[in-house]
Amino acid sequence: MRKIVNLLAICAVFATAAAARAAKPLQIFAIDVEGGQATLVVSPSGQSLLIDTGWPGFSGRDADRIVAVARFAGLKRIDYVVITHYHDDHVGGVPQLVDRIKVGTFVDHGPNLEDSDATRANYAAYQKAIAGHPHIVASPGMGLPFKGLEVHILSAAGEVIDSPLPGAGTANPYCNSEPAPEDDATENARSLGLIIRFGNFRFLDLGDLTKKKELSLVCPNNLIGTVDLFLVTHHGFDQSNSKAFVWAVHPRVAIFDNGPHKGASPAAWQTVHDSPGIEDVWQLHHAMDSDKDHNVAADRIANPDGNDQGKYIKVEGLADGTFTVINSRTGLHQTYAKK
């Protein structure tokens, strides 16, 4: 009898351990790079993907912040670095990053497509820094080989997917009232955008994609469907984040990766805030040039004043669709139940 009891106890321990492994979350870190982008994704299996690398210069400030968060997440290397486009607040940190941590594969949309000296210089510096690394030129409809996650490329080099994701494709009722968007010849319109799915949890990041291209993803039919977590496009500028787009993807929670004097513009902030079904909005910074009515409460802001604190926002997502958002400055956390 004692052997049977011991065996049952051992089985219970293994079952508990298996359940714990099964419940290990997807981790997403919105890293503060002062109005640029650096978003680190760590899968339950330990694979990692970094979306953009922040600014150049500042004595390696942004690369240091990325590496600090990567070490906190238990990483010794970053498996994929995705570069959305070649503006310096997104690609500028690559040379400093590769000097500080091992990087596997770089993913981008191909050559620079903006006619400006700045982006040509940024692209040349990027090409030099990634020499010798595996490199993927992404196109809409591609995926990345991630264990336990689905990573779908939605936009790249000015093109977008032409067929709906599974479960998407319904007509978008907000398209008819949306003003015609302007053309955009910059790298913003060429942003590599992606959606990451972990079971029932969906995270959307479109880089700095501007209105004409974002609308082509949801009008006349919504090719993306709905999402749980939305990294607000283009830091929350109103050249992006049209009502027809934001309201179609129907985010439950949104994060602005803004700086103290960059992004989270009142018009875009209001569009996100008023989106039907939204449960919460978080910000990396208090928008110093905006007003009280267009900033969230201080406990939802990682960096509430103009000081260069570098606090991040962390998200832990479970396969059943439950997720938790954590403010690294205060430890405040809010859990959003599965739908």
Image (tube, rainbow, N blue to C red):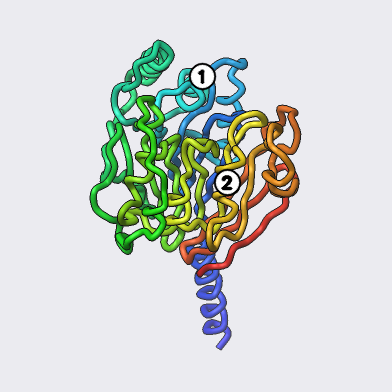
* Residue 135 image-quadrant placement: top left
On the image, the x and y values in percent for residue 66 come to 56, 31
On the image, the x and y values in percent for residue 92 come to 48, 21
Residue 105 can be seen, yes or no:
no
Residue 270 can be seen, yes or no:
yes
- Whether 290 is drawn above or below 12: the answer is above
On the image, the x and y values in percent for residue 77 come to 47, 33
On the image, the x and y values in percent for residue 339 come to 50, 69
Helix, strand or loop for disc 1:
helix
Q: Name the residue that disc number 2 marks.
A: 255
Q: At x 67% / y 37%, what residue is drawn?
A: 285
Compared across the picture, whether 270 is left or right of 81 comes to: right
In the image, what residue type sits under mark 2?
Answer: Ile
Of tags 2 and 1, which is closer to the observer?
2
In the depicted view, which residue is nearer to us: 209 or 302? 209
In the depicted view, which residue is nearer to us: 8 or 40? 40
Q: At x 41% / y 30%, what residue is drawn?
A: 188
Q: Name the residue that disc number 1 marks.
A: 96
Task: Check if mark 2's residue and mark 1's residue have beta carbons within 8 Å.
Answer: no
In the image, what residue type sits under mark 1?
Answer: Gln
Mark 2 or mark 1: whose residue is earlier in sequence: 1
Helix, strand or loop for disc 2:
strand
Question: Callout 1: 10 Å neighbours few (<14), some, many (20+)?
Answer: many
Q: At x 75% / y 34%, what residue is drawn?
A: 305
Q: State the mark number for residue 62.
A: none
**Marks 2/1: CA distance?**
26 Å
- Whether 93 is drawn above or below 48: the answer is above
Question: Callout 2: 10 Å neighbours few (<14), some, many (20+)?
Answer: many
